[in-house]
Amino acid sequence: MAKALYIDYQKCTGCRLCELVCSVFHDGISNPARSRIRVIKWEAEGLYIPMSCQQCQDAPCMNVCPVKAIYMDHDLERIVVDYDKCIGCRSCVAVCPFGAMNFNVYDRKVFKCDFCDGEPQCVRFCDEKAVDYVEVDDVSILKKRNAALRVSRAGKEASTLMAQI
Amino acid sequence: MSLDRKIAYIDLSTGDIQTKAIPLEVRRKFLGGRGLDAYLLYNHTTQGCDPIGPDNALMVSGGFLCATCASATSRTHVMAKSPLTGLLGSANMGGFFSPEMAWAGFHHLVIKGKAEHPVYIYIHNGEIEIRDARDLWGLSVTEAQWAIRDKLGDQEVKSMVCGPAGENLVRYANVMTGIKNAGGRTGMGCVMGSKNLKAVAVRGTMDIPIAHPKEALEFNKRFIDQIVSAKVNQTQGTLGTPFIWGATNSWGGIRTRNFQYNQCEYADDIEPERLDEIATETMGPYHMTGCFGCQVHCRAQYKIPDGPYAGRYDEGPEYTSQGAFCGETDTPRATTLLTANHLVDQYGVDNLEIGSLISWAMELYELGIITSKDTDGVDLRFGNDEAVIEMIDRICQRKGWLADALADGGVAASKKIGKDSFSYLIQVKGMSNLHSDERATPALALNIATSSRGSDHLRSRPAIDLYHLPEPVMRRIYSSPVPYDGPLSSEHTEYIGKAWQVFWHENCYMAVDCLGICKYHTTFLGATLPNFEDWAKVIYYNTGLEFTPQEIWGVAERCNNLERLFNLREGLTKDDPEKGDVLNHRYHDEPARRGALDVIGRVIEKDKFIKMRSELYEHKGWNEDGLPTPETLKRLGIDAEPSHLV
């Protein structure tokens, strides 16, 4: 069964280590501009959200590519760029609704998350597990569990409030 | 690689900007960060220069490993002659500023002169501009940062700013970045204000190639595993630095009512667990946040729960705020703590210094040395929460006679206040002590007395001395990377062998400051954390340069001696009560009144203290007067300073 990145942004401490290790792992270079994952921040509110490729089933980047250089690799359930075919037109960058397709101004190539071929470094280094790598069909059950916990807590708080009236 | 990062000389008077490569020879001698800053300060200022005049030089830097794949290399270092002490000024902060500056092409800035009107410096991928900041003047720390982002149309810009306190030349104003990353102590924000420099804004997307990326990654992972497996860092990552408060207060190590007591009573409302509750209630269960690349994440996010600033968002509070706004002033209430913490973050002022000075003024008020006429009606009683908040506002705005005097620092204020106010001022070299009480811990007392930037716990504090480590463990730590077979004692109330511990930690902390690593990632609070041996590997994997652990130790010794040379040049003599390596007389004369059984009744015995200080001088290769000997300077290759290598 294939896995997916499961990002629980509430756990993110905003340290951006994922960006650093992503760029060092792939390019041997420290530069967040080369990272496939980026932490988008609203510092004034303390809100940090890691953003990466969703590996869409009906991927706009794949659909728009004029030379069919982008395809779904079903082994790892990931969208892959074939650099032998890619002409660097950046149509994929333009259509991606998540900003997950990037363009590297140094090598002049598009690039995106490739799950580090099965061992995502962002997950390996994130001690908080704000970014995790889990079975695709486990994502929603994990989210359900978290939501259920919130519902249960809200219920308890409501009954406490009622008792106080 | 990071070795390609440049140094920029910026003259705000003329607008002249020069950039230079940093020669390898200079890197090998001083590495970077604080060490290289010390070298630049010694070379680019002249004896007796006015700290708030155009001749003072402001150094801004990232560490040698800044923005590489080493762990937690987020630290930004700022150095200048201090407007508070007239000696070495130095501040160190976390956050995201210096890595961004490295990606923008620079590791070091030397800023001189004074702009005609408020300006900010914008550094972007190798280019440096001086821009108008008249519309930013007067804005708070965060307002200024968000305004710069909006002006530049780039939300990824990181800025280092001075707040209103710096603009008003409060002598202990901070440089700040982000919500609360504070380059505190010694008034580096005041130097920015004096230069009409509101901010340095940086944004970069330039490559920093890693010499051995696979090894660097694996070693970083090993580091993280080692660091997060330490209990002290797990606690820190849950409760933040306030966890130290609970432990320290229970044994009697917290100065209370200035220096009258050594334990703050009825402090349940500011216990770390209570602060954690407030953070959880206002920001949810995941409320810890971290600096660049760090897995310790020691800062909490919170919203002020009630009071006049209810609902405001901030980060922290830190251990220092607890002591400054709760212990020393005897106002242990969460709302006071969180409100005061927010105010100092927004004004950009040193929490520790301002809280200490307020508590000093409270004691003078209690003694009748100052009266309500001097305070403009503020009821400066210990335990008065409103007075603490009111005085923070007044000092940062220099409103009223007393506040204006306090804004100039303790020593200057004691001259205005007169009588014997100075003898109640708990300071070393003109800078207030941390709220910790060192009477039961001679090693820690020696640390604050001899630290290069005035009373300071981050220069050489052997904090692990309190853990009563078995002697073989201590010996393993303290006899590497250079041999030591002298005495060592596991007992924290002892004087034996403590000089060596202080010396060892001084070099350890100088080394981390040169590399730009956070102190929570070395032998500071955790005895098992990485040091010299590991750094030699980290440096090699990231930069390709080979250093032995002994060479890194040598760099640290060299830079510590440079800082001493600067202080001596600016008038330090060892027994000067205002500028010397001495403690306030109360450490020797007033026994501790509260706390654990082995703490009550303790004083720092003066003769033993002097002997310990002489031992420390000897370890450092200094003579009886605290001057580095010619042989020491020659051994370290700094016998012909200023040498103007860069």
Image: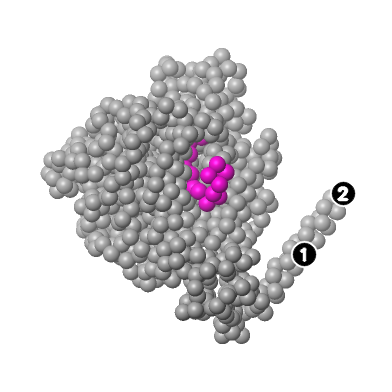
Tell me the magenta residue range: B149-163
Instruction: Tell me, yes or no, whether the highlighted magenta stretch contains residue B411.
Output: no
Label 1 Cα neighbours within 10 Å, binned few <14 / some 14-19 / many ≥20:
few
Q: Is residue A65 above or below residue B570?
A: below
Q: CA distance from mark 2 to mark 1?
A: 20 Å
Residue A105 left/right relative to B216: right
Please tell me which residue lies in front, A33 or B544. Answer: A33
Please tell me which residue lies in front, B252 or B443. Answer: B443
Instruction: Tell me, yes or no, whether the highlighted magenta stretch contains residue B156.
Output: yes
The image shows residue A131 at horizontal and vertical percentages of 57, 68
Q: Is residue B574 above or below residue B271?
A: above
Q: Which mark is residue A165?
A: 2
Say if labels 2 and 1 share a chain.
yes
The image shows residue A22 at horizontal and vertical percentages of 47, 67
Residue B101 left/right relative to B372: left
Q: Which mark is residue B558?
A: none
The image shows residue A93 at horizontal and vertical percentages of 56, 66
> Can the viewer see residue B9 in this picture?
yes
Residue at (46% x, 37% y) in the render: B131
Residue at (47% x, 69% y) in the render: A109
First-in-chain label (2 vs 1): 1
Please tell me which residue lies in front, A31 or B291. Answer: A31
> Can the viewer see residue B496 in this picture?
no
Q: Secondary structure at mark 1?
A: helix
Label 2 Cα neighbours within 10 Å, binned few <14 / some 14-19 / many ≥20:
few
Q: Which mark is residue A152?
A: 1
User: Please, which chain is the residue tagged with disc 2 on?
Assistant: A
Q: Nearer the viewer, mark 2 or mark 1?
A: 1
Residue at (41% x, 57% y) in the render: B206
The three-letter code of the residue at mark 2 reads Ile
User: Please, which chain is the residue tagged with disc 1 on?
Assistant: A
The image shows residue B269 at horizontal and vertical percentages of 63, 44
